[in-house]
Amino acid sequence: MAETHPNQGQVKVASGIDIPVAVWLFISPWVVAMTMGLAWSNWIVGVIVVVLACIRAFGAYGAEGISWINFVLGIWVIISPWFITRAATDADWWNNVLTGAAIVILAFWSAMATHSEPHTPPHTMQPA
């Protein structure tokens, strides 16, 4: 029988929404016509975020750390245009800032759902 978590619905929703956001991150270099360095960053991070969000949305409800990895990756997406290329356009910057912010917010929401679960102490034997 599968273990249930009190806030697994919130984890499913947050991580589930993160999946199409990460798919957009992956396809955005073709839509926005980015420089190759920024495009490679978005392709790699997009794949990682999709995989981790799928793992989280479809069963790893107690694995809070997965969401924190996506949180850090979202921060990277936000700041990457300034680190990778000096030739980034306004469209590149806005795309990465908005997409990265969405990943950060959704990852935080998913992580907090797990973090807010009540912790039950281990069962102890009662003295006789």
Image: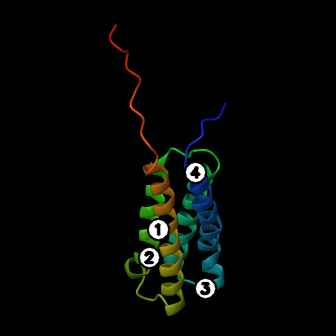
100 or 125, nearer to the observer: 125
Q: Left or right? Give the position of 6 relative to 78.
A: right
**CA distance for labels 3 and 1:** 24 Å
Amino acid carrying label 1: it is Val
User: Between disc 2 and disc 4, whose residue precedes?
Assistant: 4
User: Nearer the viewer's eye, disc 4 or disc 3?
Assistant: 4
Residue drawn at the location 49% of the way across and 54% of the way down? 113
Q: Disc 1 on helix, strand or loop?
A: helix
- Give the x, y percent position of residue 86: 40, 87
User: Between disc 4 and disc 1, whose residue precedes?
Assistant: 4
Residue drawn at the location 32% of the way across and 11% of the way down? 127
Q: Is residue 71 above or below residue 81?
A: above
Q: Which residue is mark 2?
A: 78
Q: Which residue is mark 1?
A: 104
Amino acid carrying label 3: it is Ala
User: Nearer the viewer's eye, disc 3 or disc 1?
Assistant: 1
**CA distance for labels 2 and 1:** 9 Å
